[in-house]
Image (cartoon, rainbow, N blue to C red):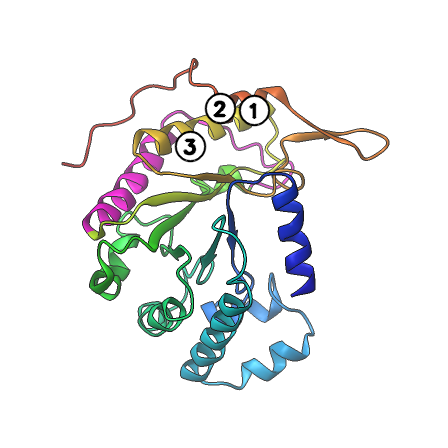
Amino acid sequence: INRVTQILGWCKAAAVKSVLFDPLHHCRILVGDERNGAGGWVNDPTEAALESKSRAELRTWAIKLLTQWATLLEPEGDYLAFELINEPNTMADYPQFLAEALPAVMAVTNRPIAIATTDQNKSWATYEIYATVQPYANSTQLFITSHWYLPGPFAFQSAGQNIAWKNSFIADIDLVMQSVKMAADLLGFPAHLGEFGNMITVPVEAERVTAIRAVRQRAKARDLKGTCLWMYASDFGITNKDANNVFSWKPNFISALTDDTTSLGAGPANLI
């Protein structure tokens, strides 16, 4: 709690407009994507304790954690929102988790709560949770968040792969964004662009810039609200760092995030 409140203090001092807090961000066991510890907790005693639990026990543990955090952070200002879980792409019991977590967390906080879509590569991702969330339709407390790293082979390529950006990728991005927005509209929730970006290992920086501009412009066109560039100062960096470890923004990336004078087109036709 001390570390979290310290970071929140930095955010407030910097006049950050909003913070999305996700205490279960790297809980690979919960989302069913443990992969022998890759990307999750490696040789952690908490991991060993959780591995023996049933899915129902894991959900109970996670919801208890969420409600404790929500209660602890209730005194914070209106800038703070919660995300129930990050990228539940492989979480088979995600609808059940939502059915149990939403009433529990909403009972202890009035803060905005983010509901993550499932696999970003599927245009029907939001509809997989529609029935579970529908009883909360038009709630002013809930919103949908989705992550955009399409196409994955371009955004996550390793050094030396040399996968080029193609403007034809925009149609794939737009199709999934449109689906998310349609489902969110049916629920009466705002839809947000929760994460996007591409790795510094993409060989041509100009293509990285074009891809970021494309995702942001399509999100704006589809009326997805807040946008969050992932790990902007590290693996997905859009900064320079001098010999004294002082960071500075790369102007071409800032332009891609803020300037619409360079348009990449209207995008493909609507689904309906």
Task: Provide the residue span drawn in magenta.
Answer: 157-186
Q: Is residue 194 above or below residue 160?
A: below
Q: Quadrant of the C terminus?
A: top left
Q: Is residue 197 above or below residue 254?
A: below
Residue shown at 55%/68% (left/top)?
72
The image quadrant of residue 203 is top right
Q: Is residue 78 above or below residue 174?
A: below
Q: CA distance from mark 2 to mark 3?
A: 12 Å
Amino acid type assigned to the residue bearing label 2 in the image: Thr
User: Residue 244 vs residue 108: left or right?
Assistant: right
How far across and down, in percent of the image, does residue 261 sit?
A: 43, 13
Residue shown at 52%/52% (left/top)?
77
User: Residue 82 vs residue 225: left or right?
Assistant: right
Amino acid type assigned to the residue bearing label 3 in the image: Val
* Dot 3: element: helix
Q: Quadrant of the N terminus?
A: bottom right
How far across and down, in percent of the image, does residue 83 sit?
A: 45, 58
Q: CA distance from mark 1 to mark 3?
A: 14 Å
How far across and down, in percent of the image, does residue 206 sit?
A: 56, 21
The residue under label 1 is 254
* Dot 1: element: helix
Q: Does label 2 or label 3 sit earlier along the sequence? A: 3
Of marks 2 and 3, the one in the foreground: 2
The residue closer to the viewer here, 234 or 166, is 234
Are the residues at dot 1 and dot 2 in contact (C-beta closer than 8 Å)?
A: yes
The residue under label 3 is 215
Q: CA distance from mark 1 to mark 2?
A: 6 Å
Amino acid type assigned to the residue bearing label 1 in the image: Ile
Q: Which mark is residue 188?
A: none
Q: Which mark is residue 258?
A: 2
